[in-house]
Image (cartoon, rainbow, N blue to C red):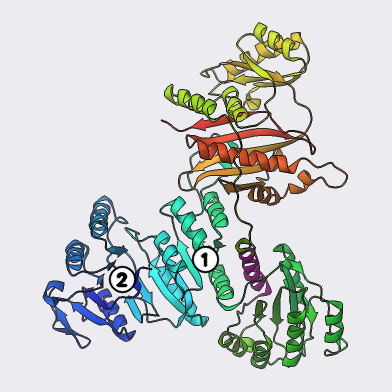
Amino acid sequence: MLEALFQPDSVAVIGASRTPGKVGHDVFANLVAGGFPGEIVAINPAAQEILGHPCYDTLKSYGKKVDLSVIAVPQGLVEQAVYDSVAAGVGGIIVITAGFKEVGAEGAELEKKVARYCKRRGVRLVGPNCLGLISTAAKLNASFAGGMPTPGAISVLSQSGALCTAILDLAAGRHLGLQSVVSIGNKADITEVDLLRSLGADANTTVIVGYLEDISNGDDFVKAAEEASSAKPVVLLKSGTTAAGQKAAASHTGVLAGADTAYGAAFKQSGIVRADTFEQLFDYATAFSMQPLPKGNRVLIITNAGGPGTMAADAVEKAGMVVAELDRNVATALRKQLPAAASVGNPIDVLGDAPPDRYAAALAAAQDDDEVDSVVIILTPQAMTKAPQTARAIAETMNGDKPVLVSFMGGLGVMPGRDELAGANLPDYESPERAVGALRAMYEYSMWRNRPPRIVNRFRVHRRRVERIITRSQRIGRLQLNEVKSKTILKAYGFKIPVGQLATSAEEAVEIAERIGYPMAMKIVSPDVVHKTDLGGVKLNVANAEQVMDAFDLMMLRIRQRVPEARIEGVYVEKMLGRGLEIILGMNRDPQFGPMLMFGLGGIFVEVMKDVAFHLAPITFDEAMQMLVATRSYAMLEGKRGSKGVDIEAVAAGLQRISQLTTDFPQIVELDINPFIVGEIGTEPVVADARMTLSAP
């Protein structure tokens, strides 16, 4: 816990102002109006008093120890204000002032200087260029936001001060209480990692909500996020998800791993609930803060109109959850309480003229049914609808065992009911789809919380062999490893490689083919030819010596014509593989989060549909299986409609072996096994082609 920031006994505002509308005045006024019980010190050499509090020229003239200082002076005065604060014994500093790294090199250098000074003296720094900090538990509003929020259990961290003010305003409109709000600004010292650790351990915070534009340290972030998520939901909105001008990569994995893919993989692995929009951020936070987590994915829908009930049922199935079936005995008992025209299926339709007691009866039945994990209640405003009374009936019937999310659809007609729902701690959404979306987030997080322990398998491998290849390749500057070297590395890590050899002449190619046995596959080997097939550098099913000679000569001719500058090392001649399903396994090393594994089916599935799944390494067997299931083409692995499936566990093992290889050797920055030929259960997958890229030494 960052006590000096969240629980200070005294606060000084350096740059406090008498003029309303100035940042220094608004910060000081917020501290006073918020009821901060400790000492509030105004520092302003041009004033005698502000809002009834005496002013001091400097912190030194104040003469007492201060726990927290808030700096709101022009940029040129910030450095001295930091020195004065440290001299006064502060444990924390908030620099509101802008004009640092966000404006250029000079500002960035000053920011680093100030941060280094604070770090050497053990003082924690928030900002610069931030809104400030709020802690409702400490009655501390050290910000220039508009007033103190209602106390609650949601804590907010944001890289944007403007988003903080929007969150505060929306929270007030939704009657959501907040525990703390921190605007981290330029993150010169305190980052999202520090706050995840602090808020994750804070007993008064039950949900963490955040907005981030970038992440300071990938490894530390994943560890801190996983630790926080294990204790409470963490809901984050991450902006900057496009990759304008992204550098072209050499592998399929690199091409498909866009700027945002690694963030998505990191969030998923660490249990973060990701919101794609500002609307979702609050939809999810509302549900998590007000309701228990579901124990399963079976959803019951209660509605007074058929159309919205159907909309909700569609949303449930699209979200990967199940439209629950009422237990027969529960349904029979409920039917006795509802009109004959009502439906006791799912959705339960209590009819358009439903009084509050029908909703209460349906909810009570759902709560009593062990086949139901969560409930979505829909109300549309009919002439006879009593929205506030229905809201009260729902609240009085709830027993707190299962999550109940409500959608009062409409505007003025249901507004009094919405107010009642907010007062009863019931999350309300304007549409059934939004309610179901929040419920899906709760279910997925619940499944993550209940996941089995992570066990990363370690395979017996020939690590020294790989080390020699990589070291020599880096030393001579050969960073694009050809198929021969890539396959040698993969073989050392337990992959099956077809029998083959590099030929530098047509005669040598024939000798290799005769020794290995036909049919053969022949492929050009060149560090300058990545897509061999497109350039005529691949020949399959070569059946005799004459065809080998012809294929070798034609391949050499085509490559020299089409890529005259290409360095050609020879032609790889290998035993032709049997039939199987073509799969792509890959790895792209993200600069923040490290090796990111990829799985996808070959051909149109990866080229056109981009049907791929990613996961950060190291990976467990269960996580590898989840990658496979996450693709739309998973049914082809299982085998459907008469087709035979493939050895799915062997594919998962391949991902685990790549995971071990790329965590053992950070020098590998890209890797593609394309294709990886997988057969029926009991057969061993084979690497048909592979390439790797190394980092510069």
Label 1, on which residue?
A: 234
Q: Is residue 164 left or right of residue 381?
A: left
Q: CA distance from mark 2 to mark 1?
A: 24 Å
Please give the name of the residue rendered at 74% of the width and 87% of the height, measured from the top-left corner.
Answer: 359
Q: Amino acid at mark 2?
A: Ala
Q: Residues within 10 Å of mark 1 (few under 14, many from 20)?
A: many
Along the viewing direction, whichever of 220 and 343 lies nearer the viewer: 220
Please give the name of the residue rendered at 70% of the width and 51% of the height, measured from the top-left corner.
Answer: 629
Please give the name of the residue rendered at 13% of the width and 76% of the height, measured from the top-left corner.
Answer: 63
Sequence order check: which comes first, mark 2 or mark 1? Answer: 2
Q: Amino acid at mark 1?
A: Val
Q: Is residue 349 visible?
A: yes
Examine the structure image and report whether residue 555 is included in the region drawn in magenta. Answer: no
Q: Is residue 73 positioned above or below 563 on the image?
A: below
Range covered by the magenta-colored residues: 429-446
Residue 285: x and y, percent?
A: 54, 72
Label 2, on which residue?
A: 4
Q: Residues within 10 Å of mark 2 (few under 14, many from 20)?
A: many
Q: SS of the residue at dot 2?
A: helix
**Quadrant housing the N terminus:** bottom left
Residue 344: x and y, percent?
A: 83, 81
Along the viewing direction, whichever of 55 and 451 lies nearer the viewer: 451
Q: Is residue 319 positioned above or below 180 on the image?
A: above
**For residue 374, which quarter of the picture?**
bottom right
Examine the structure image and report whether residue 432 is included in the region drawn in magenta. Answer: yes
Q: Is residue 238 visible?
A: no
Residue 637: x and y, percent?
A: 76, 44
Along the viewing direction, whichever of 458 and 134 lies nearer the viewer: 458
